[in-house]
Image (cartoon, rainbow, N blue to C red):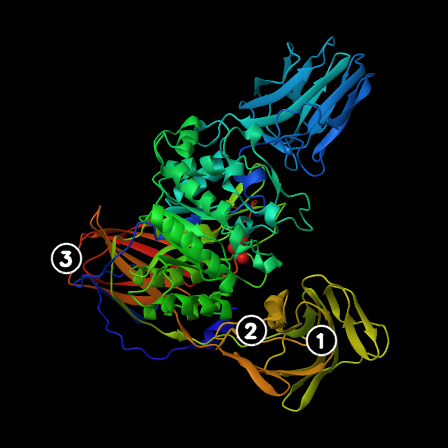
Amino acid sequence: MLQSSKRRMNCVLVTVSLLLGGALSALAAPTTASITVQMDQPGIQVPSTLHGLFFEDINYGADGGLYGELVQNRSFEHRDALYAWTELVRGAAAGQISICNEAPLNATNPHFLRIAVKNAADGGVGAVNSGFDSIALQEGDSYLLSIYARRHAGEKAVLKIQLENASGRILAADTINEIGTTWKKYELKLRCVATEPKAKLVVLATQPGAVDVDMISLFPEKTFKGRRNGLRADLAQALADIKPGFLRFPGGCIVEGKDVNNMYRWKDTIGDVAERKENWNVWQDRVSPQYSQTYGLGFFEYFQFAEDIGAEPLPIINCGMTCQARQGLPVPLDQLDPYVQDALDLIEFANGSVTSKWGAKRAAMGHPKPFNLKFLGVGNEQWLQEYFDRYAVFYKALKAKYPAIQLITTAGPQPNDGLWQFAWDKFKSGTPADIVDEHYYRPPQWFLEQNGRYDTYDRKGPKIFVGEYAAHEPKRTNTLRSAIAEAAFATSLWRNADVVSMASYAPLLANINHTQWGPDLIWFDNARISLTPNYYVQAMLSQNRPDNVVPVKVVAPQVQPPPITGRIGVGTWLTQSEFKDVTVTRNGEVLFKSEFSNNNLDWDLFSGDWSIIDGALRQTSGDENCRVFIGDISWTDYTLSLKARKLGGSEGFLISFGGRDGENITWNMGGWGNTQHGLDVPGAVDAFVPGKIETGRWYDIRVEIKGASVKCFLDDKLVQQADSKPTSTLFASAGRDKKTNEIIVAVANASDTPQTASVNLTGIKAIKPNAQAIVLTSAQPGDENTLNKPNRIKPTKEAVTLSGPQFERTFPAWSFTVLRITP
Ligand code: AHR
């Protein structure tokens, strides 16, 4: 890897002033770069909100994640009412459990569990909860159990509550004896005698008769800040440690939901947890088909957590639209009032006086003081006129009542497609917007190439909220390389802090057993967490954010982009299609020619229903992402040509190339509901162009690859192309921390080679010799942290000695360095 990349290094030249101050590294490579920090310039102010957090209940981020509840399906309101529970008949007892609904706890919690004991003998009858794939317990810790119960008149009821390991060893236990005939909440404190990662909760009735139970809840006593109904301490602390400037909540697509009943409505998420109306989770998938939302981590808990960690709350409200990416429908404009009212009421809930209707509810939950809400997002990733019609209604109503609240407007799901363009055309032609939310999930190379993105944004236009971003590696893992690409990009956010006021990596959390989306900032299981290199980049950025940044000039060698290398594939998304005459040629030589003559499919199947019919390869499933692949992972500089015909469904074709080990570049034709063609590759001239694929006609498709460039033709017409450009090895930004008066210099080296740069702090006469360097790097750019090896990549803090405001420093290959220097 190192060798080949070194070959790519094109030591294009740089004029270097060899200003030898205190050489910092004994291993210094020859100086080939310079970083000039213009401390004599006034610079621009950096908002304290620049680096924040994006929270969404995806990947079991809330239930089974940050929310401390250990019992899954505590209220029996899951659509499979006994989900995570199993019946238990112990000893020689007899009886059964059932789900009932007469005279329930309350109207929003209509189901409960009835335990009917015919004969208790020497055991009992009850139910076992498996938690979220089990319950992790710590020796010596206490766990707070609560349960609503009632016995039937004239019958006895005693409940034994036990925490047990897989072989039935009791790790903590207690008994509830005096159960009345009406619903009542009972609470126990269970002290655990041994550490056990795979425990379960047993609820056992030990007297003949029937007992009804509901809202069976178990929390560690040690939650974040010891709060009742609180957050898992290690995860919450890791988030607090970043010192985020804001906290976005509750997402993400979850705000939108798949249909009207699935929309996130904040009023469902406050008040007594036993009265919160549960919902299924829009991120339900094949891995986690039972994914639900208890809303235990609701809007009150969210505001409180934001306050606890010193972050500005930044809620995103449903704007009367379901998820357009999931073919959702908007609420008709004449039925929008309740959604607008929700938005107005949310502001009152956060900021209203205790005598206001919603302020009183906040006070009743234990927070009479306002939460001081300043920002509100209107919709997540919505697009086109449907959105702007609804946004206009929200904008008018919100600004009329709360003119000081800064509104966040979405620019859609991509950083540069037709939907994004539509939104920006609106803003440029007078649609008012305080802050525009842009999202991008792109390869590391894209982040390097986009370093100048905001340099040309209108300084008088709306501010930018980079509401979701992450560098996506082929296997969507959290590599050092992806983290350094984000750090390099973030230097441009500092430089453009007069336009970009907020930015957050996404998604935030991922339960290793229930992942819908990677990469993520923090991985966890029930007992452990793993902080990614991307986490450390966010922490370094936020903890070292200057209050003021000055211009920085970087002169450094350039790196050529890697050639597009790898095999080919065809596929579909929610569509049936067929493909034939697939050939791959290089300089007249045929590397591959398809032969669809019998039903012997020798392509590698990823997913879908594929067969050979009438000399063509046919895909008949209606699923998303149906793909097959073939060829050699070392192919470069080739032309792929084929014919394709759509047979039915809602989109077009997925043609891939440059495929290696799960990595594929895709030309998505007729994507996004058959509205656009997308070429998601760094250097794309127009990554998305309007386009559709008709059913029933054969198309000629050709993809020409040369080095890192690609041209895509449809019926011999050039439709899209990409031409990756060389990028700098070094990216830097710098400024001043007003509180400590330190100069902060942040430098990312996004190359395979250490880079030695002369650093010059112009306008600074002298500095204190003792400075600090915080460095994040690792042996290989593909390195990751895992739950088993969580500390492989971590920032190190070094004391460094500088002899003056001009010095040399070697920045290791694939590293991010923050220098703190006292003038
Ligand atoms: O962060 C994961 C998802 O990506 C978010 O829910 C959505 O807003 C985006 O498409």
Name the foreground residue: 147 vs 513.
147
Which mark lies nearer to you, 2 or 3? 2
Image quadrant containing the C terminus: bottom left
- Rendered residue at 64%/86% (across/down): 715
Mark 2 or mark 1, earlier in chain = 2
Residue 688 placement (x, y as % from top left)? 53, 73
Which mark lies nearer to you, 1 or 3? 1
- Quote the CA–CA distance across marks 2 and 1: 21 Å
User: Dot 2 corresponds to which residue?
Assistant: 679
- Rendered residue at 55%/75% (across/down): 690
Q: Residue furthest right?
A: 598
Helix, strand or loop under label 3: loop
User: Dot 3 corresponds to which residue?
Assistant: 766
Q: Residue furthest left?
A: 765
Report how many numbered discs are placed on residues in the image: 3
- Quote the CA–CA distance across marks 2 and 3: 51 Å
Helix, strand or loop under label 1: loop
Residue 199 placement (x, y as % from top left)? 65, 29
Which mark lies nearer to you, 2 or 1? 1
User: Residue 797, relative to residue 450: is it above or below?
Assistant: above
Mark 1 or mark 3, earlier in chain = 1
User: Dot 1 corresponds to which residue?
Assistant: 695
The disc label shown at residue 344, or none = none
> Is 724 displayed left or right of 160 in the figure?
left
Instruction: For label 1, count other residues whose C-alpha is less than 10 Å away and answer few (under 14), some (14-19) or many (20+).
Output: some
In the rendered structure, are the residues bearing label 2 and label 3 in contact, judged by CB atoms less than 8 Å apart? no
Residue 259 placement (x, y as % from top left)? 61, 51
Q: Amino acid at mark 2?
A: Leu
